[in-house]
Image: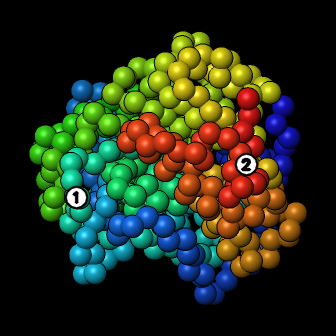
C-alpha cells in the first residue's frame, strides 16, 4: 500500500470536491516560473492543433457532440529567432490549475518553454521518428515538458495530447475545459487510451502531407511529410502510463512504450510483445496490479527507479513546485511530500536522459549503454531485475 502523504491526501480531497489551501496569503507580484533548457543540438518548434474525432461521440458532452481534443506538436526547428516562445500553459488554464493544487491563484505565472510557435521544421535527412505523450490524471499535456522538449531537441516529433474532461486546457475559441473529478463521468485510463488511435491517424495525415487541424490554421513550413508513421513510440505519466500500455495492446503502430510510475489499473492480463520500460517510484512491482503487468511483458523490458523519487518526480512538478514553495512559505516537510528527497536538478537530468535513450534504442536502433545496467553518471538510479 502506498504511504499517504500530504500530497496524496490533497489529491484525495480534490477528488472529493473539497477546497484545499496551504493557508498562505496571496502575493501581489506572482513569480515567473522557469524550466530547464533542453540539451539536444536542435532548436525547437511547436504548433497546437485542434482536432475533432467525428467518428466518436464525446463521452461526457452529450448527444450531438463529437470527441474534441487539443494537441501540441513539438519538433526540431531552425531559424527560430523571430518566432515567440510558447507558454507552458495558457493564462486561463494556469489560473484554474493553481488553486486546484492548493496554491493561491496569483502566486505564479507559467514558464516559457523552449518551443518557438510556428518555426520551420528542421530536417537533416529522412523522416523524423514520432513519440506520443499522455498526461497524468487531472493534469494537462504540458506536465512533462522537460522530457518532451528534450526529445524534440534530439530530433523527435513529439505529439502531446490533452484528454478533454480530465485536463486543464483551452480551445482556440476561448472555451476552457477542466477535469471532471469523481462520479460516473470521470475518465479512466481506458478513456485516455481510446483517444490514441485517432491521434495516430492524424499523425498519418501529417505524414501524408495533410493538415488535420479542424480550423485549417496553417502548419509550420516543412511539417507536412516530415513525420515517420513507421517509427512511433509512446510514453505517459501516471494514468497516461497505463494508457500507454493499453494503447500498445490495441494498436501495433506503437512500437515502444515508456511508463512513468503508472498504477497499471485496470489490470493488464494480455501479453505485450514490444519493448516497454517502467520508471517507477510509488507504484512498484511489489504491489498489484503493476506486478501483473510486468509479468505480461514478453518482449524487451526494463524497470528503473530513482532513489528518493515520489509519484511526481519524473515530471515537471519536481522542478516547478520548489519555485512555488519558496513563494508560499511551504515547509521542508510539505515540500518533501510533493517531490520526495530526489534533488530537482538530478530529476531533470534523469527525465532528459532516460526517455531519449529508450526511444533512441527502439526507434533509431542505436545502442544505449545507459539502459544496460547501473551508470556512474546516474548513481541514484536502480535497475530492478
Image quarter of residue 305:
top right
* Residue marked by disc 2: 381
- In this rendered view, identify the residue nearer to me: 216 or 123: 123
Residue 55: percent from left, percent from top: 24, 27
- In this rendered view, identify the residue nearer to me: 11 or 380: 380
Using the rendered image of the protein, determine whether residue 18 is visible from the camera's viewpoint.
no
Q: Residues within 10 Å of mark 1 (few under 14, many from 20)?
A: some
215 left or right, relative to 70: left
Q: Is residue 260 above or below residue 324?
A: above
Residue ID at (77%, 58%): 342
Rendered-image quadrant of the N terminus:
top right
Q: Is residue 4 above or below residue 96?
A: above
318 left or right, relative to 230: right
- In this rendered view, identify the residue nearer to me: 319 or 54: 319
356 left or right, relative to 302: left
- For the residues labelled 2 and 1, the Cα–Cα distance comes to 34 Å
Image quarter of residue 327:
bottom right
Using the rendered image of the protein, determine whether residue 232 is visible from the camera's viewpoint.
yes
Residue 284: percent from left, percent from top: 75, 33
Q: Which mark is residue 123?
A: 1
Amino acid at each position: 500500500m502506498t504511504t499517504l502523504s500530504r500530497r496524496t491526501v490533497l489529491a484525495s480531497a480534490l477528488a472529493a470536491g473539497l477546497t484545499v489551501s496551504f493557508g498562505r496569503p496571496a502575493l501581489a507580484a506572482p513569480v515567473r516560473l522557469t524550466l530547464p533548457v533542453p540539451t539536444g543540438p536542435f532548436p525547437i518548434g511547436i504548433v497546437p492543433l485542434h482536432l475533432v474525432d467525428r467518428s466518436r461521440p464525446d463521452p461526457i458532452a452529450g448527444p450531438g457532440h463529437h470527441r474534441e481534443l487539443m494537441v501540441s506538436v513539438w519538433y526540431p526547428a531552425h531559424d527560430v529567432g523571430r518566432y515567440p516562445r510558447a507558454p507552458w500553459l495558457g493564462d486561463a488554464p494556469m489560473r484554474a490549475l493553481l488553486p486546484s493544487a492548493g496554491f493561491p491563484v496569483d502566486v505564479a505565472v507559467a514558464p516559457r518553454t523552449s518551443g518557438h510557435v510556428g518555426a520551420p521544421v528542421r530536417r537533416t535527412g529522412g523522416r523524423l521518428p514520432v513519440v506520443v505523450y499522455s498526461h497524468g490524471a487531472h493534469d494537462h499535456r504540458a506536465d512533462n515538458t522537460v522530457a518532451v522538449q528534450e526529445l524534440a531537441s534530439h530530433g523527435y516529433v513529439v505529439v502531446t495530447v490533452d484528454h478533454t474532461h480530465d485536463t486543464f486546457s483551452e480551445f482556440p475559441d476561448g472555451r476552457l475545459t477542466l477535469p471532471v473529478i469523481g462520479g460516473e463521468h470521470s475518465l479512466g485510463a481506458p478513456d485516455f487510451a481510446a483517444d490514441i488511435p485517432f491521434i495516430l491517424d492524424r499523425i498519418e495525415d501529417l505524414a501524408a502531407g495533410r493538415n488535420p487541424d479542424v480550423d485549417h490554421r496553417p502548419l509550420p513550413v516543412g511539417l507536412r511529410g516530415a513525420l515517420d508513421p513507421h517509427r512511433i513510440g509512446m510514453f505517459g505519466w501516471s494514468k497516461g502510463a497505463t494508457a500507454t500500455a493499453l494503447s500498445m495492446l490495441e494498436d501495433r503502430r506503437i512500437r515502444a512504450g515508456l511508463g512513468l510510475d503508472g498504477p497499471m489499473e485496470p489490470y493488464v492480463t494480455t501479453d505485450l510483445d514490444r519493448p516497454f520500460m517502467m520508471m517507477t517510484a510509488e507504484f512498484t512491482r511489489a504491489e498489484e496490479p503493476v506486478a501483473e503487468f510486468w509479468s505480461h511483458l514478453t518482449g524487451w523490458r526494463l524497470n528503473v527507479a530513482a532513489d528518493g523519487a515520489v509519484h511526481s518526480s519524473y515530471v515537471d512538478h519536481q522542478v516547478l513546485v520548489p519555485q512555488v514553495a519558496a513563494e508560499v512559505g511551504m515547509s521542508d516537510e510539505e515540500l518533501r511530500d510533493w517531490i520526495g528527497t530526489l534533488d530537482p536538478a538530478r530529476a531533470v537530468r534523469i527525465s532528459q536522459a532516460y526517455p531519449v535513450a529508450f526511444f533512441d534504442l527502439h526507434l533509431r536502433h542505436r545502442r544505449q549503454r545507459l539502459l544496460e545496467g547501473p551508470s556512474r553518471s546516474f548513481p541514484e538510479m536502480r535497475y530492478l531485475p
